[in-house]
Image (spheres, rainbow, N blue to C red):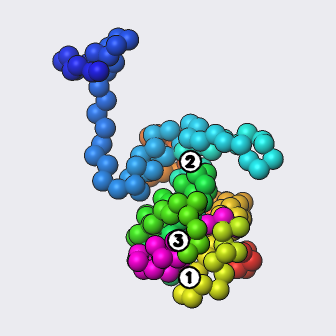
Amino acid sequence: RMVKMGDKVRKKNGQYPLYDLPRIRTLRELVELKYRSCPRKTAFSYSDRLGNKVSKTFGDVYHNINTLESWMDTQGIQNRHIALIGENSYLWLITFFAIVNGGNVVIPVDKGLQKGEIVSLMKKADVTMVFCSKFCKEGFLGEEGIECVSFEEVEKLCHIMGKVEDKWIIEEDGNDGIHKKENRIKNDDVDKI
């Protein structure tokens, strides 16, 4: 329980200052706010397939979302209804944000449903594309009018686009010392995916 006391909030364990936060209207603004305020701070930690601990900073999150969103834009994936099927993971989250930030509608689907139930839901939602795990993708190959992209393909895309020629640009205001990374992508690298 919190009680406001002047410019502080009284909580069970003491008083904490209130923070003035900018108004956030979109998920894009939320991601950009965290990127600009603390790009090197850890946003996510998880274990990879081999059990190794992986940490992602807010800068990594920002760049991975923008990478996937840019790829979707170059592929003409805009104003579509896109299903997202899979276990909660870093790639699931990156894909969710990229779909929404790209002007699409995301339909999260429970991975535990039977294929017939999933197909029925996708038809009702006018889904034309699915992002899912490799295993799930194999089940949707051949479904009429549905493009499938696996999270493994998303991971490759983010890796290829993240390691190509880097060019560093200093932010225009120059006050925060944050550097923006601009990637130059070779079309033949992206076409391999």
Across and down, in percent, residue 74 comes to 54, 78
User: Which residue is nearer to you in this view: 189 or 76?
Assistant: 76
Give the answer, above or below, for where 30 lies relative to 68: above
Q: On the rendered structure, is 6 left or right of 78?
A: left
Q: Are marks 2 and 3 in contact (CB under 8 Å)?
A: no
Across and down, in percent, residue 132 comes to 61, 66
Residue 123 is inside the magenta segment: yes
Q: Along the polypeptide, which appears first: circle 2 or circle 1?
A: 2
Disc 3 secondary structure class? helix
Across and down, in percent, residue 116 comes to 55, 75
Q: Which span of residues is magenta-colored?
A: 117-134
Q: Which mark is residue 59?
A: 2
Q: Along the polypeptide, which appears first: circle 3 or circle 1?
A: 3
Disc 2 secondary structure class? helix
User: Which residue is nearer to you in this view: 93 or 76?
Assistant: 93
Amino acid type at image mark 3: Ile
Q: Which residue occupies 52% across, 71% down?
A: 117
Amino acid type at image mark 2: Gly
Residue 42, picture quadrant: top right
Q: CA distance from mark 2 to mark 1?
A: 32 Å
Q: Nearer the viewer, mark 3 or mark 1?
A: 3
Q: Nearer the viewer, mark 2 or mark 3?
A: 3
Give the answer, above or below, for where 84 lies relative to 31: below
Mark 1 is surrounded, within 10 Å at the Cα level, by few (under 14), some (14 to 19) or many (20 or more) other residues, namely: some
Q: Which mark is residue 146?
A: 1
Amino acid type at image mark 1: Ile
Q: Along the polypeptide, which appears first: circle 2 or circle 3?
A: 2
